[in-house]
Image (cartoon, rainbow, N blue to C red):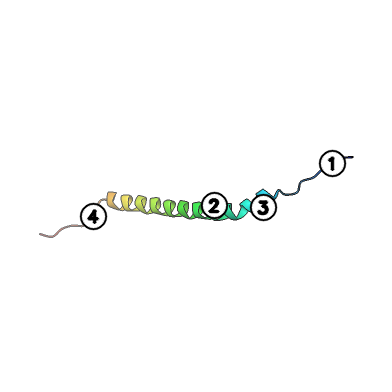
Amino acid sequence: MTYAQRVEVLASHSMLLAIPAFVPALAVVGVILGIAMRDRRSERREAERDAEPHDREENS
């Protein structure tokens, strides 16, 4: 009996079956990161707007 001396594995079946599980998970992580970044930007804008001095003159 002789064995093949050179074996090339192009793709493992378990790796191919895992792709449908990882792609949606990465998409969910991307959406969560996008929402978190947008929320932080809006909080920063609100903080800057509240910190600005109000230059209104009040007439009494």
Front: mark 3 or 4: 3
Seen from the viewer's position, the closer of residues 10 and 17 is 17
Spatial distance from mark 3 to mark 1, Cα to Cα?
23 Å
Q: Amino acid at mark 3?
A: Leu
Front: mark 1 or 2: 1
Of callouts 1 and 2, the N-terminal one: 1
**The C terminus sits in image quarter:** bottom left
Q: Which mark is residue 16?
A: 3
The secondary structure type at the circle numbered 4 is loop
Of callouts 3 and 1, the N-terminal one: 1
Front: mark 4 or 2: 2
- The residue drawn where x is 31% and y is 50% is 47
Spatial distance from mark 2 to mark 3, Cα to Cα?
16 Å
Q: Which mark is residue 55?
A: 4
- The residue drawn where x is 40% and y is 52% is 41
Front: mark 1 or 4: 1
- The residue drawn where x is 86% and y is 39% is 5
Q: Amino acid at mark 1?
A: Arg
Assess whether mark 4 and mark 1 are in contact (beta carbons under 8 angstroms): no
The secondary structure type at the circle numbered 3 is helix
Query: To which residue does mark 2 refer?
Result: 26
Spatial distance from mark 3 to mark 4, Cα to Cα?
63 Å
Query: To which residue does mark 1 refer?
Result: 6
Of callouts 3 and 4, the N-terminal one: 3
